[in-house]
């Protein structure tokens, strides 16, 4: 056929990882042009991911053996539906958050010698880590990419350089390191048991169970599943708004994505119904606790951060729904779709909150009267993304919750269905609590400064994206399911 | 046989280090404990290289240890930097956060 498919897939895969790395290095040298390089780099990365998606749709999963060195000593990258879907959403959100950041960080960029200026290189390193993580195809490479993502995120979380932000970042770093060490020990145990680092079923032996426990505990910490979520709200709420958006929308999903791959591919033979319900119970607790804390939050960014704690819970419902007697494919598709929907909506909400913070000079919910009347675009974006967080039609969040609910009902899991519905009601409550203040009429302007138009535009576009996701659900779901592992809970491993 | 000893010692160091990261309250001690736990994992991995003896020990765990050391050094550096920054920021009163030096 024509043009684009003559470019081999490995070029696209390599570009998706190498271009953010190259951009980050260039920015460290050419600091003055960091923002311009960043936006340009974002477009290049997005183009590479689009090329990869095109190849995936035409030819199925693709892979690249880096430098021609075969595993296990070399690195093999593999692009299947989930990987390309995650890289795609990262690209979209990355582009808009980056454009937003050019305006949000500007007034601060001149003053401190190396506070806000480090945003761009750190974010590009983070982006490289994220893309490499999605594409990684062996346990150790996943470890390295998890660490790249973790260290870059901690750097970003500390950017604000206030005592609160640095303390939160330090706590985040320690949790993240603890999590990755536990993960690495698990890798060592799996290697001891199987002699391979591939994501293929391990045998049901005590060593396998020890690895399962260590790696899962480490990843739960990094994903902030209740009751290991304590580090998340301060780290996400104290960071600058574009950073909060990236951390909440993308970074917590990265460690969840690793967990998903491990449980469905590596540990599938070990996981019985009882094991699969453990994350399910924690997920239900996370949804309730996170939502209640969001209801009680006094600052807007805190509210949104606790909403992330709650929404992370929904992700973990995939394990009981997909592995405890239910069918695998629908649950897997539902959770990946949920990741995309939540990422778009959460990024939009955090950017809108950043606009509020900039315009009002604070984000105390009780004092945000007049917000709707004075920041109509940002508040509209907040409301549209809120609809997706709650899960009302026709948003992406609605489709995601609907798919999860269908999977729960099909498996006869009424408890989880109840949690899904209850969580939606609680989300309505905390979104509306904010709006009950924001809609209050205030006669004169209370804003301390005006906003550049692109800050409102980026929030709005992301919010509309979360709505469009619901309208274009079918092709996206089809893409996400290309190359899914066929081994279910019953499968005894073995190569596909 | 000696590989087993190394593996056990590695696992014990790992457990001690984890306990230290969670239980110690001074931040510097947490960072040291993290390094001890890391060394435990590395020791365990090196012991795993002994599973294959012929014609030479398994190079894969050693490659992992080398990479792991690089990661541990960078993580330690970042942690120490943040500890210094935190001390600097919390010694000064609040409004000093944005006035540079």
Image (cartoon, coloured by chain):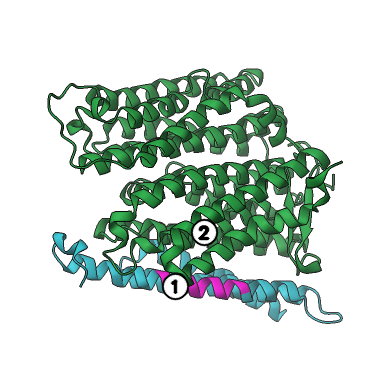
Residue highlighted by disc 2? A124
Mark 1 surroundings: few (<14), some (14-19) or many (≥20) residues within 10 A: some
Which residue does the image show at 64% across and 58% down from the upper left?
A: A17
Which residue does the image show at 33% across and 64% down from the upper left?
A: A115
Mark 2 surroundings: few (<14), some (14-19) or many (≥20) residues within 10 A: many
Which residue does the image show at 58% across and 65% down from the upper left?
A: A22
Classify residue B67 by image quadrant.
Answer: bottom right
Residue A325: percent from the left, percent from the top? 70, 28
Q: Which is nearer the eye, A217 or A4?
A: A4
Classify mark 1: helix, strand or loop.
Answer: helix
Question: What quarter of the picture does the N terminus of chain A occupy?
Answer: top right
| Location of residue B42 with respect to A179 vertically, above or below | below
| Location of residue A461 with respect to A93 vertically, above or below | above
Task: Say whether residue B56 is magenta.
Answer: no
- 3D distance between C-alphas at marks 2 and 1: 21 Å
Q: Colour of chain B?
A: cyan
| Location of residue A317 with respect to A394 vertically, above or below | below
Residue highlighted by disc 1? B76
Q: Colour of chain A?
A: green
Which segment did they paint magenta? B67-78
């Amino acid at each position: 056929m024509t043009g684009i498919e003559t470019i081999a897939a490995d070029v696209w895969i390599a570009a998706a990882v190498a271009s953010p790395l190259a951009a980050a290095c260039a920015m460290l040298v050419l600091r003055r042009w960091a923002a311009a390089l960043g936006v340009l780099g974002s477009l290049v990365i997005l183009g590479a991911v689009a090329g990869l998606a095109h190849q995936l749709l035409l030819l199925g999963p693709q892979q690249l053996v880096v430098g021609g060195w075969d595993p296990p000593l070399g690195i093999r990258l593999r692009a299947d539906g989930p990987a390309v879907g995650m890289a795609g959403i990262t690209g979209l959100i990355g582009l808009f958050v980056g454009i937003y950041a050019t305006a949000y960080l500007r007034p601060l960029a001149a003053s401190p010698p190396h506070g806000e200026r480090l945003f761009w290189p750190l974010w590009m390193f983070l982006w490289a880590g994220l893309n490499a993580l999605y594409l990684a195809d062996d346990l150790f490479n996943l470890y390295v990419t998890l660490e790249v993502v973790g260290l870059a995120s901690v750097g970003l979380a500390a950017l604000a350089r206030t005592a609160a932000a640095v303390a939160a970042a330090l706590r985040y770093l320690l949790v993240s390191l603890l999590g990755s060490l536990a993960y690495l020990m698990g890798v060592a145990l799996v290697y001891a048991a199987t002699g391979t680092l591939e994501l293929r079923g391990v045998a049901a032996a005590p060593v396998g169970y020890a690895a399962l426990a260590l790696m899962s505990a480490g990843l739960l910490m990094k994903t902030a599943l209740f009751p290991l979520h304590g580090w998340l709200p301060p780290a996400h709420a104290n960071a600058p708004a574009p950073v909060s958006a990236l951390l909440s929308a993308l970074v917590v999903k990265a460690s969840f994505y690793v967990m998903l791959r491990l449980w469905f591919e590596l540990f599938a033979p070990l996981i019985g119904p009882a094991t699969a319900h453990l994350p399910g119970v924690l997920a239900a607790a996370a949804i309730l606790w996170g939502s209640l804390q969001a209801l009680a939050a006094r600052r807007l960014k805190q509210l949104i951060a606790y909403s992330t704690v709650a929404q992370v819970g929904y992700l973990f419902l995939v394990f009981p729904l997909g592995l405890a007697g239910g069918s695998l494919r629908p649950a897997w598709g539902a959770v990946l779709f949920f990741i995309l929907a939540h990422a778009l909506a959460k990024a939009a909400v955090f950017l809108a909150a950043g606009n509020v913070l900039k315009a009002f000079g604070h984000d105390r919910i009780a004092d945000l009267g007049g917000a709707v009347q004075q920041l109509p675009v940002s508040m509209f974006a907040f409301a549209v993304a809120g609809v997706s967080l709650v899960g009302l039609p026709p948003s992406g969040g609605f489709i995601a919750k609907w798919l999860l609910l269908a999977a729960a009902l099909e498996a006869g899991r009424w408890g989880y269905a109840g949690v899904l519905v209850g969580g939606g009601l609680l989300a309505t409550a905390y979104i509306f609590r904010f709006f009950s203040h924001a809609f209050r009429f205030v006669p004169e302007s209370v804003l301390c400064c005006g906003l550049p138009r692109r800050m409102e535009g980026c929030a709005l576009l992301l919010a509309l994206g979360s709505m469009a996701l619901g309208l274009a659900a079918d092709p996206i779901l089809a893409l996400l399911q290309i190359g899914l592992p066929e081994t279910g809970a019953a499968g005894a491993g073995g190569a596909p | 046989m000696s590989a087993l000893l190394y593996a056990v010692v590695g696992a014990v160091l790992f457990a001690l280090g984890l306990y230290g990261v969670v239980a110690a309250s001074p931040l510097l001690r947490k960072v040291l404990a993290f390094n001890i736990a890391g060394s435990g994992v590395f020791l365990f991995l090196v012991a795993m290289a002994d599973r294959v003896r012929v014609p030479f020990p398994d190079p894969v765990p050693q490659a992992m240890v080398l990479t792991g050391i690089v990661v541990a050094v960078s993580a330690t550096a970042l942690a120490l930097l943040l500890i210094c920054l935190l001390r600097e920021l919390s010694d000064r009163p609040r409004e000093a956060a944005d006035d540079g030096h």
